[in-house]
Amino acid sequence: MPQEKQAGMVVLTEVGRLREVVAAARGQGKRIGLVPTMGALHEGHLSLVRASKAECGLSVVSIYVNPTQFGPSEDLDRYPRNLESDLDQLRGCGAEVAFVPSNQTMYPEGCSTWVEPGEVAGPWEGECRPGHFRGVATVVLKLLNMVQPDVAYFGQKDYQQARVVRKMVDDLNVPVAIHTCPTVREPDGLAMSSRNRYLDSDARQKALVLWRSLCVARETAARGERDAATIVARMRKTILAAEGASIDYAALADPETLAPVVRVDHPAVALVAVNIDGTRLIDNLVIAPP
Ligand code: AMP
Protein backbone atom coordinates (compact mmCIF):
# COMPACT_ATOMS: atom_id res chain seq x y z
CA MET A 1 0.00 0.00 0.00
CA PRO A 2 1.40 3.46 -0.85
CA GLN A 3 2.13 5.76 2.04
CA GLU A 4 -0.46 8.47 2.01
CA LYS A 5 -1.27 11.61 3.89
CA GLN A 6 -4.97 12.14 4.47
CA ALA A 7 -6.69 14.91 6.38
CA GLY A 8 -3.94 15.24 8.94
CA MET A 9 -3.44 11.53 9.57
CA VAL A 10 -0.52 9.68 8.02
CA VAL A 11 -0.96 6.03 7.11
CA LEU A 12 2.34 4.20 7.33
CA THR A 13 3.27 0.65 6.49
CA GLU A 14 7.05 0.62 6.96
CA VAL A 15 9.03 0.74 10.20
CA GLY A 16 11.72 3.12 8.85
CA ARG A 17 9.22 5.85 7.96
CA LEU A 18 7.34 5.26 11.21
CA ARG A 19 10.52 5.86 13.19
CA GLU A 20 11.19 9.10 11.25
CA VAL A 21 7.70 10.46 11.97
CA VAL A 22 7.95 9.51 15.65
CA ALA A 23 11.47 11.01 15.93
CA ALA A 24 10.27 14.30 14.39
CA ALA A 25 7.40 14.52 16.90
CA ARG A 26 9.72 13.68 19.78
CA GLY A 27 12.09 16.39 18.52
CA GLN A 28 9.22 18.84 18.98
CA GLY A 29 8.90 17.73 22.58
CA LYS A 30 5.77 15.67 22.02
CA ARG A 31 4.78 12.67 24.12
CA ILE A 32 4.18 9.59 22.00
CA GLY A 33 1.16 7.33 22.57
CA LEU A 34 0.61 3.88 21.04
CA VAL A 35 -2.75 2.12 20.72
CA PRO A 36 -2.30 -1.42 19.37
CA THR A 37 -5.41 -2.86 17.67
CA MET A 38 -6.45 -5.58 15.26
CA GLY A 39 -8.81 -3.22 13.42
CA ALA A 40 -12.58 -3.64 12.92
CA LEU A 41 -12.64 -0.60 15.15
CA HIS A 42 -15.49 0.31 17.50
CA GLU A 43 -16.05 2.75 20.36
CA GLY A 44 -13.95 0.57 22.71
CA HIS A 45 -10.90 1.10 20.51
CA LEU A 46 -11.73 4.76 19.98
CA SER A 47 -11.86 5.34 23.75
CA LEU A 48 -8.20 4.26 23.87
CA VAL A 49 -7.36 6.63 21.01
CA ARG A 50 -9.09 9.48 22.83
CA ALA A 51 -7.18 8.66 26.03
CA SER A 52 -3.95 8.80 24.03
CA LYS A 53 -4.97 12.07 22.36
CA ALA A 54 -5.68 13.60 25.78
CA GLU A 55 -2.22 12.73 27.08
CA CYS A 56 0.10 12.65 24.07
CA GLY A 57 1.07 15.01 21.26
CA LEU A 58 1.40 12.16 18.74
CA SER A 59 -0.92 9.15 18.83
CA VAL A 60 0.04 6.11 16.78
CA VAL A 61 -2.70 3.52 16.25
CA SER A 62 -1.54 0.20 14.88
CA ILE A 63 -3.93 -1.96 12.90
CA TYR A 64 -2.60 -5.48 12.50
CA VAL A 65 -4.40 -8.83 12.72
CA ASN A 66 -1.58 -10.73 14.38
CA PRO A 67 -1.57 -14.32 13.08
CA THR A 68 0.68 -15.64 15.85
CA GLN A 69 -1.96 -15.09 18.54
CA PHE A 70 -4.56 -17.24 16.75
CA GLY A 71 -4.72 -20.99 17.22
CA PRO A 72 -4.94 -23.28 14.17
CA SER A 73 -8.71 -23.77 14.57
CA GLU A 74 -9.49 -20.15 15.42
CA ASP A 75 -11.00 -17.34 13.37
CA LEU A 76 -7.88 -15.73 11.80
CA ASP A 77 -9.19 -16.10 8.24
CA ARG A 78 -12.63 -14.71 8.92
CA TYR A 79 -11.58 -12.07 11.49
CA PRO A 80 -13.38 -8.85 10.39
CA ARG A 81 -11.20 -6.51 8.34
CA ASN A 82 -12.38 -3.11 7.15
CA LEU A 83 -9.40 -0.83 6.71
CA GLU A 84 -11.15 2.10 5.00
CA SER A 85 -13.78 2.40 7.70
CA ASP A 86 -11.09 2.01 10.39
CA LEU A 87 -9.03 4.83 8.89
CA ASP A 88 -12.11 7.07 8.66
CA GLN A 89 -12.85 6.48 12.34
CA LEU A 90 -9.25 7.21 13.32
CA ARG A 91 -9.30 10.43 11.32
CA GLY A 92 -12.52 11.35 13.10
CA CYS A 93 -10.75 10.91 16.46
CA GLY A 94 -7.76 12.99 15.36
CA ALA A 95 -5.16 10.20 15.50
CA GLU A 96 -1.95 11.46 13.91
CA VAL A 97 -0.55 8.14 12.64
CA ALA A 98 -2.13 4.86 11.55
CA PHE A 99 0.48 2.11 11.34
CA VAL A 100 -0.73 -0.70 9.10
CA PRO A 101 2.14 -3.16 8.68
CA SER A 102 2.07 -6.26 6.49
CA ASN A 103 2.87 -9.76 7.74
CA GLN A 104 6.18 -9.42 5.91
CA THR A 105 7.00 -6.28 7.91
CA MET A 106 6.01 -7.79 11.24
CA TYR A 107 7.42 -11.28 10.72
CA PRO A 108 10.03 -11.25 7.97
CA GLU A 109 11.23 -14.65 6.89
CA GLY A 110 13.50 -16.22 9.46
CA CYS A 111 11.98 -14.32 12.39
CA SER A 112 12.40 -16.82 15.22
CA THR A 113 12.49 -15.05 18.61
CA TRP A 114 9.49 -15.15 20.93
CA VAL A 115 8.39 -13.64 24.22
CA GLU A 116 7.23 -16.41 26.54
CA PRO A 117 5.03 -14.83 29.23
CA GLY A 118 5.08 -16.30 32.73
CA GLU A 119 2.49 -17.45 35.23
CA VAL A 120 -0.05 -14.68 34.71
CA ALA A 121 -0.58 -16.06 31.19
CA GLY A 122 -1.16 -19.61 32.46
CA PRO A 123 -4.83 -19.93 33.42
CA TRP A 124 -8.11 -18.92 31.68
CA GLU A 125 -7.31 -17.62 28.19
CA GLY A 126 -3.88 -19.22 28.47
CA GLU A 127 -5.43 -22.64 29.01
CA CYS A 128 -8.18 -22.29 26.42
CA ARG A 129 -5.92 -20.74 23.77
CA PRO A 130 -2.46 -22.33 24.01
CA GLY A 131 0.21 -20.02 22.57
CA HIS A 132 -2.18 -17.04 22.44
CA PHE A 133 -0.33 -14.88 24.95
CA ARG A 134 3.04 -15.80 23.49
CA GLY A 135 1.80 -14.32 20.21
CA VAL A 136 0.31 -11.28 21.97
CA ALA A 137 3.41 -10.58 24.07
CA THR A 138 5.68 -10.96 21.05
CA VAL A 139 3.70 -8.65 18.77
CA VAL A 140 3.21 -6.06 21.54
CA LEU A 141 6.94 -5.99 22.33
CA LYS A 142 7.71 -5.64 18.62
CA LEU A 143 5.24 -2.74 18.29
CA LEU A 144 6.69 -1.11 21.42
CA ASN A 145 10.17 -1.39 19.93
CA MET A 146 9.04 -0.05 16.56
CA VAL A 147 7.25 3.01 17.98
CA GLN A 148 9.06 3.47 21.32
CA PRO A 149 6.07 5.28 22.82
CA ASP A 150 5.97 6.97 26.21
CA VAL A 151 2.58 5.42 26.91
CA ALA A 152 0.74 2.41 25.45
CA TYR A 153 -3.01 2.01 25.89
CA PHE A 154 -4.87 -1.25 26.50
CA GLY A 155 -8.49 -2.07 27.34
CA GLN A 156 -9.72 -3.65 30.54
CA LYS A 157 -12.02 -5.67 28.25
CA ASP A 158 -9.07 -8.03 27.74
CA TYR A 159 -8.19 -8.11 31.41
CA GLN A 160 -5.67 -10.95 31.36
CA GLN A 161 -4.00 -9.53 28.24
CA ALA A 162 -3.47 -6.19 30.00
CA ARG A 163 -1.93 -8.04 32.97
CA VAL A 164 0.34 -10.07 30.68
CA VAL A 165 1.52 -6.90 28.92
CA ARG A 166 2.18 -5.07 32.20
CA LYS A 167 4.15 -8.02 33.57
CA MET A 168 6.19 -8.30 30.38
CA VAL A 169 7.01 -4.58 30.46
CA ASP A 170 8.04 -4.83 34.13
CA ASP A 171 10.01 -8.05 33.74
CA LEU A 172 11.85 -6.95 30.58
CA ASN A 173 12.42 -3.33 31.70
CA VAL A 174 10.62 -1.88 28.71
CA PRO A 175 10.63 1.93 29.14
CA VAL A 176 6.92 2.58 28.58
CA ALA A 177 3.93 3.37 30.81
CA ILE A 178 0.96 1.04 30.35
CA HIS A 179 -2.46 2.67 30.75
CA THR A 180 -5.50 0.43 31.06
CA CYS A 181 -8.82 2.00 30.04
CA PRO A 182 -12.32 0.93 31.20
CA THR A 183 -14.43 -1.46 29.13
CA VAL A 184 -16.83 0.34 26.79
CA ARG A 185 -20.25 -1.33 26.67
CA GLU A 186 -23.35 -1.17 24.53
CA PRO A 187 -26.31 0.47 26.34
CA ASP A 188 -27.58 -3.00 27.36
CA GLY A 189 -24.22 -3.97 28.87
CA LEU A 190 -22.67 -6.12 26.12
CA ALA A 191 -18.94 -5.34 26.00
CA MET A 192 -18.02 -3.93 22.60
CA SER A 193 -15.91 -6.36 20.60
CA SER A 194 -14.93 -6.80 16.96
CA ARG A 195 -16.30 -10.35 17.27
CA ASN A 196 -19.79 -9.02 18.08
CA ARG A 197 -20.07 -8.66 14.29
CA TYR A 198 -20.36 -12.43 14.08
CA LEU A 199 -23.59 -12.39 16.13
CA ASP A 200 -27.00 -12.56 14.45
CA SER A 201 -29.86 -10.89 16.30
CA ASP A 202 -30.74 -14.05 18.24
CA ALA A 203 -27.11 -14.62 19.31
CA ARG A 204 -26.74 -10.90 20.10
CA GLN A 205 -29.63 -11.25 22.58
CA LYS A 206 -28.16 -14.41 24.11
CA ALA A 207 -24.76 -12.73 24.44
CA LEU A 208 -26.19 -10.54 27.20
CA VAL A 209 -25.71 -13.46 29.60
CA LEU A 210 -22.02 -12.60 29.90
CA TRP A 211 -22.69 -9.17 31.36
CA ARG A 212 -25.66 -10.52 33.36
CA SER A 213 -23.45 -13.18 34.95
CA LEU A 214 -20.88 -10.54 35.94
CA CYS A 215 -23.62 -8.40 37.49
CA VAL A 216 -24.85 -11.47 39.40
CA ALA A 217 -21.30 -11.98 40.72
CA ARG A 218 -21.08 -8.33 41.73
CA GLU A 219 -24.47 -8.35 43.47
CA THR A 220 -23.88 -11.66 45.22
CA ALA A 221 -20.55 -10.44 46.59
CA ALA A 222 -22.06 -7.08 47.55
CA ARG A 223 -24.69 -8.91 49.61
CA GLY A 224 -21.86 -10.47 51.63
CA GLU A 225 -21.32 -13.87 49.97
CA ARG A 226 -17.62 -14.67 50.30
CA ASP A 227 -17.51 -18.22 48.98
CA ALA A 228 -16.15 -18.10 45.42
CA ALA A 229 -17.68 -21.47 44.47
CA THR A 230 -21.15 -20.22 45.41
CA ILE A 231 -20.73 -17.05 43.39
CA VAL A 232 -19.33 -18.93 40.39
CA ALA A 233 -22.24 -21.40 40.53
CA ARG A 234 -24.65 -18.45 40.22
CA MET A 235 -22.65 -17.04 37.32
CA ARG A 236 -22.75 -20.39 35.50
CA LYS A 237 -26.50 -20.74 36.04
CA THR A 238 -27.05 -17.25 34.59
CA ILE A 239 -24.95 -18.04 31.52
CA LEU A 240 -26.53 -21.44 30.88
CA ALA A 241 -29.98 -19.83 30.85
CA ALA A 242 -29.14 -18.89 27.24
CA GLU A 243 -29.95 -21.81 24.96
CA GLY A 244 -26.84 -23.14 23.26
CA ALA A 245 -24.40 -21.16 25.43
CA SER A 246 -21.34 -23.15 26.44
CA ILE A 247 -18.86 -21.99 29.07
CA ASP A 248 -15.09 -22.08 28.53
CA TYR A 249 -14.63 -20.68 32.02
CA ALA A 250 -16.47 -18.63 34.62
CA ALA A 251 -14.19 -17.79 37.51
CA LEU A 252 -13.11 -15.43 40.25
CA ALA A 253 -9.43 -14.60 40.24
CA ASP A 254 -6.90 -12.43 41.99
CA PRO A 255 -6.83 -9.10 40.11
CA GLU A 256 -3.00 -9.07 40.01
CA THR A 257 -1.87 -12.68 39.64
CA LEU A 258 -5.07 -14.07 38.09
CA ALA A 259 -4.78 -17.14 40.33
CA PRO A 260 -8.23 -18.48 41.27
CA VAL A 261 -9.59 -17.21 44.58
CA VAL A 262 -11.45 -19.37 47.09
CA ARG A 263 -12.90 -16.56 49.16
CA VAL A 264 -13.79 -13.01 48.18
CA ASP A 265 -12.23 -11.27 51.17
CA HIS A 266 -10.59 -8.71 48.88
CA PRO A 267 -11.44 -7.38 45.41
CA ALA A 268 -11.45 -10.13 42.79
CA VAL A 269 -11.94 -10.13 39.05
CA ALA A 270 -14.88 -12.12 37.70
CA LEU A 271 -13.89 -13.58 34.32
CA VAL A 272 -16.09 -15.28 31.73
CA ALA A 273 -15.47 -16.86 28.34
CA VAL A 274 -18.58 -18.18 26.63
CA ASN A 275 -19.40 -19.62 23.21
CA ILE A 276 -22.67 -18.30 21.84
CA ASP A 277 -23.80 -20.02 18.64
CA GLY A 278 -20.18 -20.54 17.57
CA THR A 279 -18.84 -17.13 18.60
CA ARG A 280 -16.45 -17.02 21.53
CA LEU A 281 -16.86 -13.93 23.73
CA ILE A 282 -15.01 -12.83 26.86
CA ASP A 283 -15.81 -10.26 29.53
CA ASN A 284 -14.82 -9.40 33.09
CA LEU A 285 -15.68 -7.20 36.06
CA VAL A 286 -13.77 -6.37 39.21
CA ILE A 287 -15.99 -7.13 42.22
CA ALA A 288 -15.46 -6.45 45.90
CA PRO A 289 -16.83 -7.59 49.25
CA PRO A 290 -19.01 -5.02 51.05
P1 AMP B 1 -8.33 -5.79 19.63
O1 AMP B 1 -8.48 -5.03 18.36
O2 AMP B 1 -9.51 -6.64 19.96
O3 AMP B 1 -7.01 -6.52 19.73
O4 AMP B 1 -8.29 -4.71 20.79
C1 AMP B 1 -7.35 -3.67 20.78
C2 AMP B 1 -7.38 -2.96 22.11
O5 AMP B 1 -8.69 -2.43 22.33
C3 AMP B 1 -7.10 -3.92 23.29
O6 AMP B 1 -6.29 -3.24 24.23
C4 AMP B 1 -8.47 -4.18 23.83
O7 AMP B 1 -8.49 -4.52 25.20
C5 AMP B 1 -9.15 -2.85 23.59
N1 AMP B 1 -10.61 -3.02 23.58
C6 AMP B 1 -11.33 -3.89 22.83
N2 AMP B 1 -12.64 -3.81 23.13
C7 AMP B 1 -12.74 -2.86 24.10
C8 AMP B 1 -13.84 -2.31 24.84
N3 AMP B 1 -15.09 -2.72 24.65
N4 AMP B 1 -13.59 -1.36 25.75
C9 AMP B 1 -12.31 -0.93 25.97
N5 AMP B 1 -11.25 -1.40 25.30
C10 AMP B 1 -11.45 -2.35 24.38
Image (spheres, rainbow, N blue to C red):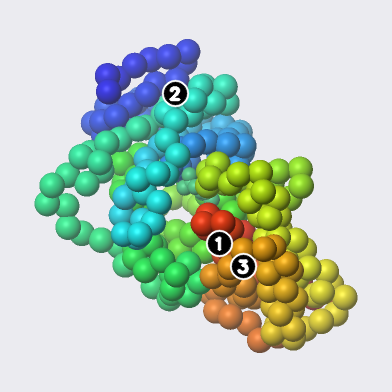
In primary-sequence order, the first of circles 1 and 2 is 2
**What residue does disc 2 label?**
84
Q: Does residue 144 appear to the left or right of 114 in the view shown?
A: right
- Sequence-wise, the earlier of marks 2 and 3 is 2
Q: Position of residue 71 (x, y in %)?
A: 34, 60
Label 1, label 2: how many angstroms apart (C-alpha)? 30 Å
Question: Camera-side residue: 171 or 256?
Answer: 256
Report crowding for label 1: few under 14, some 14 to 19, many 20 or more residues within 10 A (C-alpha).
Answer: some
Where disc 3 sits, the SS reads strand
Name the residue located 48 percent from the left edge and 29 percent from the top edge: 86
Q: Is residue 101 left or right of residue 235?
A: left
Quick one: SS at disc 2? helix
Which amino acid, mark 1? Asn
In this view, the residue in front, 151 or 138, is 138
Give the quarter of the image for residue 32.
top left
Asked whether disc 2 touches disc 3, contact meaning CB atoms under 8 Å apart, the reply is no
The reply to whether residue 201 is visible in this rendering is yes
- Residue visible at 75% across and 76% down? 234
